[in-house]
């Protein structure tokens, strides 16, 4: 898509990096602090319950901020702020309704239900379809009109896969199978840091199988290395909480780098150099941040640290989601090279950091 903007015309300040990334990182921190105060104050939630609320928020984020492609607000506005406010409000209402439904069904507070296991599995299902398989698990052509495309994704991610992995085994008296989110930062490596290369040349569904395979192997290796280092993600002890903090930190750093900073300043590097630098760089920054967190807080406060991680995570992805405020694409509408790496005129810079087809209406 050629830019319609006059190259000599002044560009909005936030259409250039690193100012865009710095500004929205600060905005995300401010909003995260407000969310902390809201959930801990008026709603009176403890840290574990508050973290669960954000888990449900992120589950619905992939549906209403991605697979629905801006619908329903896109039906009546093209303004990113109006669309973001409307869709974010709808999303939060759906989150509230989901929590109430779990409480009604299980007849107990939501934190004591299976909502956490459901959310983790639904998160995996959504990313598996939208990003690994390019939206082709439920939409063979990758496209459909809205809201059909979004509804199909929601049925798959929120209903079918969690039903198969969680509720059917439970009905049969077996142990439910959930997908812990330790895989998420590993999934960024093939899909984001390496931009899908070289498997994107295979086409679907073969590329999706390759992405899933790389993510699975990488996750097993990552979990094993953590355990050897005394940071056991799956432990019920302090080592498990530390593992969760590290994974949440790498997720925050990875999405901040990919979505708010648009992979600045390495966007012009050729592959595989860009992928290697991004992977090593985000992991290095995450390890440094993790070390500061675990040394700066007592083990008894690690629950608060995790809650803080999710406050910031929800704030930054709310800004970035293409169906919400779409900071990911900020500056690309008028200047395809303005918001991130200089990919050259005519290049769909929006495809960085990760290619995804979300159906008509985007």
Image (cartoon, grey):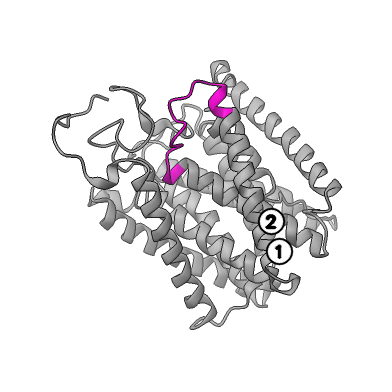
Q: Which residue corresponds to the image point at 36% horizontal and 54% vertical from the top-left? A: 23
Residue 284 appears at what percent x and percent y? 63, 43
Closest to the observer: 101 or 113? 113
Residue 195 appears at what percent x and percent y? 52, 28
Closest to the observer: 92 or 317? 317
Is 180 one of the magenta-colored residues? Answer: no
> Do residues under tags 2 and 1 come within 8 Å of each other at their CB atoms?
yes
Q: Which residue corresponds to the image point at 69% horizontal and 68% vertical from the top-left? A: 302
Q: Residues within 10 Å of mark 2 (few under 14, many from 20)?
A: few
Residue 354 appears at what percent x and percent y? 49, 34
Q: Secondary structure at mark 2?
A: helix
Q: Range of the magenta residues?
A: 259-275
Q: Which residue is mark 1?
A: 295
Residue 271 appears at what percent x and percent y? 53, 21
- Separation of marks 2 and 1 at Cα, in angstroms: 6 Å
Q: How many marks?
A: 2
Q: Is residue 283 left or right of residue 351?
A: right
Q: Which residue corresponds to the image point at 46% horizontal and 60% vertical from the top-left? A: 315
Q: Which mark is residue 291?
A: 2
Residue 259 in view (yes/no): yes
């Amino acid at each position: 898509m050629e830019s319609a903007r006059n190259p000599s015309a002044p560009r909005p300040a936030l259409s250039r990096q690193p100012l865009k990334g710095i500004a929205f990182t600060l905005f995300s921190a401010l909003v995260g602090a407000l969310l902390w105060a809201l959930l801990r104050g008026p709603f009176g939630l403890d840290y574990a319950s508050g973290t669960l609320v954000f888990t449900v928020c992120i589950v619905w984020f992939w549906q209403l901020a991605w697979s629905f492609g801006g619908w329903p607000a896109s039906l009546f506005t093209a303004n990113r702020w109006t669309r973001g406010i409307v869709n974010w409000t709808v999303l939060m209402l759906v989150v509230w309704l989901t929590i109430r439904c779990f409480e009604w069904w299980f007849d107990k507070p939501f934190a004591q239900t299976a909502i956490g296991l459901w959310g983790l599995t639904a998160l995996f299902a959504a990313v598996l379809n939208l990003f690994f398989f390019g939206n082709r698990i439920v939409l063979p052509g990758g496209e459909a009109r809205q809201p059909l495309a979004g509804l199909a994704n929601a049925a798959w991610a929120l209903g079918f896969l969690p039903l198969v992995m969680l509720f059917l085994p439970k009905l049969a008296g077996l142990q439910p199978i959930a997908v812990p989110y330790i895989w998420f930062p590993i999934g960024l490596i093939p899909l984001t840091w390496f931009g899908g290369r070289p498997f994107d040349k295979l086409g679907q569904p073969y590329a999706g199988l390759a992405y899933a395979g790389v993510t699975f192997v990488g996750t097993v290796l990552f979990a094993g290395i953590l355990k050897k280092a005394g940071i056991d993600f799956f432990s019920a002890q302090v080592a498990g909480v530390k593992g969760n903090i590290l994974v949440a930190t790498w997720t925050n750093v990875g999405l901040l780098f990919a979505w708010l900073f648009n992979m600045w300043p390495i966007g012009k590097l050729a592959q595989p150099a860009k992928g290697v630098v991004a992977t090593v760089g985000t992991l290095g920054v995450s390890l440094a941040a993790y070390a500061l967190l675990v040394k700066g807080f007592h083990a008894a406060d690690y629950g608060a640290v995790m809650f803080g991680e999710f406050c910031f995570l929800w704030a930054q992805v709310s800004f970035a989601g293409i169906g919400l405020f779409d900071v990911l694409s900020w500056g690309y509408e008028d200047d395809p090279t303005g918001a991130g790496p200089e990919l050259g005129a005519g290049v769909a810079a929006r495809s960085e950091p990760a290619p995804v087809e979300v159906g008509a209406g985007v």
